[in-house]
Image (spheres, rainbow, N blue to C red):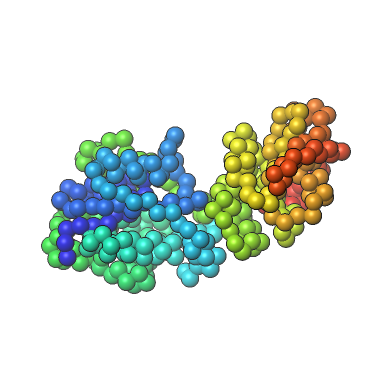
Amino acid sequence: MNRKAIALLSGGLDSTLAVKVLLEQGIEIEALNFTSAFCTCNCRNSTCRSEAQRVAKEFGIKIKVLQKGSDYIDIIRNPKYGYGKGINPCVDCRIYMFKLAGKYMEDAGASFIVTGEVLGQRPMSQRIDTFRVIERDTGLTGLILRPLSAKHLEPTLPEKNGIIDREKLLDIIGRSRRQQIELAEELDVENYPCPSGGCLLTDKIFARKVKDILDHKQDITTKDLYLLKAGRHFRVDETAKIIIGRDDQDNIKLKNLMQINDTLIEPLNFAGPTALICGDHDGTAILNIAGRMVVRYAKNKANGNNQLRVVENGTVAILTVDSPIDHETLERMRIC
């Protein structure tokens, strides 16, 4: 074994500290940052990806960003180890990332992997039995070092081989971040990333939108995934749904994420939400439904106006609706 490791650097406090602890022992680190449409973070005015890149620059280490691709959707659709409280396949997700990290480790000439996982912090994926399953299924038994909780775990191969001084590792356990914050002060880690981020797949409400698209679309695109984070979603039938923007930021997202065969509807002479029709639809009927939704959510801003601009397959048309959609019809179609 050598003194080079691959670190999973998420952009959060825990992984930042794990890297710092190893750097303090003179270990050469290369970082991997995984991104997906389901990432959420409490950092303001930044993303976990930019935080990970900032930390890597500050520590003077190389970083590679990997986007979880279409193969990750297959894992969400059929996880071997099931879901958590939402539609989150946490164990399968960790296995997915560690397999990619293991391959990168070999390509980079490193000997082991470092992660900021803390025993007991996540109820599904950060348990001793789960750690063992992950290592077994990835073929990385003894090669995943968790510096923040190492003293509660069996020694890893780099510890046994004297590459890592186990006495300088930590015994953090549980969900409190008090010890991590104290460690950050001790190691002079300032302006550290958000103490906690997360995954939208654990959110029960967001999970409804994910389940809906998994149930109704086989070939899911990256844009489909990012659309899940915008607006109110309504299922019209087996092939089509309507998304209504909640604010100006949502309206911009809907325009930017519009795909071939999608239909965009927006107010013509009044302020209000944008609607995006996704999937195959029957034309006039669904256009009328979406238009009436826009008028309803515009509320008083419509001021009696009922004309909308329709953009579809490169053409622009004017749509006139007779009234806002009724509450019962709206709720019957609501996904989230």
Q: Nearer the viewer, residue 19 or 182?
A: 19
Instruction: Give the image location of residue 298, x and y in percent.
Output: 73, 33
The quadrant where residue 179 appears: top left
Tell me which residue sits at (75%, 57%) in the image.
237
The residue at the far right in this view is 322
Tell me which residue sits at (54%, 59%) in the image.
87
Instruction: Give the image location of residue 171, x and y in percent.
Output: 25, 54
Q: Is residue 87 visible?
A: yes
Q: Is residue 129 visible?
A: no
Instruction: Give the image location of residue 233, x and y in percent.
Output: 67, 48
Tell me which residue sits at (18%, 53%) in the image.
27
Tell me which residue sits at (40%, 45%) in the image.
49
Q: Is residue 33 rendered to the left or right of residue 256?
A: left
* Relative to 262, residue 322 above or below: above
Q: Nearer the viewer, residue 162 or 104?
A: 104
Q: Is residue 60 rendered to the left or right of residue 259?
A: left
The residue at the far front in this view is 314
Q: Nearer the viewer, residue 143 or 83?
A: 143
Q: Is residue 200 rendered to the left or right of residue 312?
A: left
